[in-house]
Image: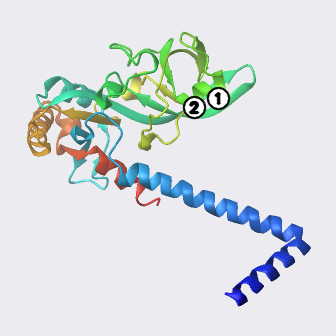
Amino acid sequence: MQTLMQDVRYGLRMLRKSPGLTAIILIMLTLGIGATTAVFTLIDAILLRPLTYENPEQLVQMWEKRTEAPIQQFELSYPDYLDVKRENKVFSQMGGYWKNSVTLTGKEGAEQLLVAVATTGFFETLGIQPILVRTFAAGEDDLRKNSPVMLSYGAWQRRFGGNPSIVGTPLVLDGELATVVGVLPKNFVFAPTQSAELWMSPRVSGFFLRRNGYWLHPVARLKPGVSLEQAQAEIQIISRRLARQYPDSNAGVSTDLVDLRRQIVGQIQPVL
């Protein structure tokens, strides 16, 4: 113990004689501790705890799969998504998401932003309620003018000072007018969209309306008492019907359901 105390006192004397080195060591320790804390927070929030949505065990993500193709798993087309949403008897709610980037134009110039895109019903599927006003309403998926936008809590605070009158404010996104319709809760996180500040409706048109245009990630909530296996069996029936009706785009295409937590953890684990 005496030797240890002598070493500590010697180390402190050396640090006092070299303030520059001391500062560098303190900065490195601070960064190291901060990075470790951030990684643990991410692991704790995503890998160790259940998803922070209503009854998360009922949530699944949907993929289409083509067995005879180089890319075997891919997103759904919007028409396929609408057909599954309309015909299924196993989901109580269903919505979809996508990642994108847009140019936000304001008084200080133009800025490129990472945004998340959500269809009508997405937030309701997760069980998320906005803290201001509303989410996306029926019929807004294909709006091109004055399309609705939701703010993350962080963007609301940083960009608009937490102004409670922000709803109704116009934004210029990719040269088109959009309107703020709501603000998401402070604790809302959806890992696949990373740190998106804005959530937009999809403004579906052109390529996005094609049955062979694969871009949407649907998320669905199983009805109480319906297992993943039961839902999978019904969705395959719908897939086979679509393959017969639209052979040019859907022949050889099936649909898979994946537990949403497994889907998110599977995306994050390689990063960690």
Counting from the top left corner in percent of width and height, residue 29 is at 69, 65
Kindly indicate whether the residue at mark 1 contacts the one at mark 2 (C-beta within 8 angstroms): yes
- Could one spot residue 212 in this view of the protein? no
Question: Going by the image, does 256 lie left or right of 173?
Answer: left
Counting from the top left corner in percent of width and height, residue 205 is at 40, 21
Question: Going by the image, does 254 lie left or right of 129?
Answer: left
Between 83 and 125, the one lying in front of the other is 125
Location of residue 214 (image quadrant): top left
| C-alpha distance separating marks 2 and 1 | 6 Å
- Check the image and report above or below for 256 versus 94: below
In the image, what residue occupies the spot 23% across and 42% down?
A: 57
Counting from the top left corner in percent of width and height, residue 23 is at 82, 64
- Check the image and report above or below for 55 versus 15: above
Q: Identity of the amino acid at label 2?
A: Gly
In the image, what residue occupies the spot 18% across and 23% down?
A: 86
Q: Identity of the amino acid at label 1?
A: Arg
Q: Which residue is mark 2?
A: 154
SS at mark 1?
helix
- Give residue 158's mark: 1
Between 171 and 181, the one lying in front of the other is 181
SS at mark 2?
helix
Q: Residue furthest front?
A: 2
In the image, what residue occupies the spot 55% across and 57% down?
A: 37
Counting from the top left corner in percent of width and height, residue 271 is at 47, 59
In the image, what residue occupies the spot 72% across and 90% down?
A: 3
Which quarter of the rendering shows the N terminus? bottom right
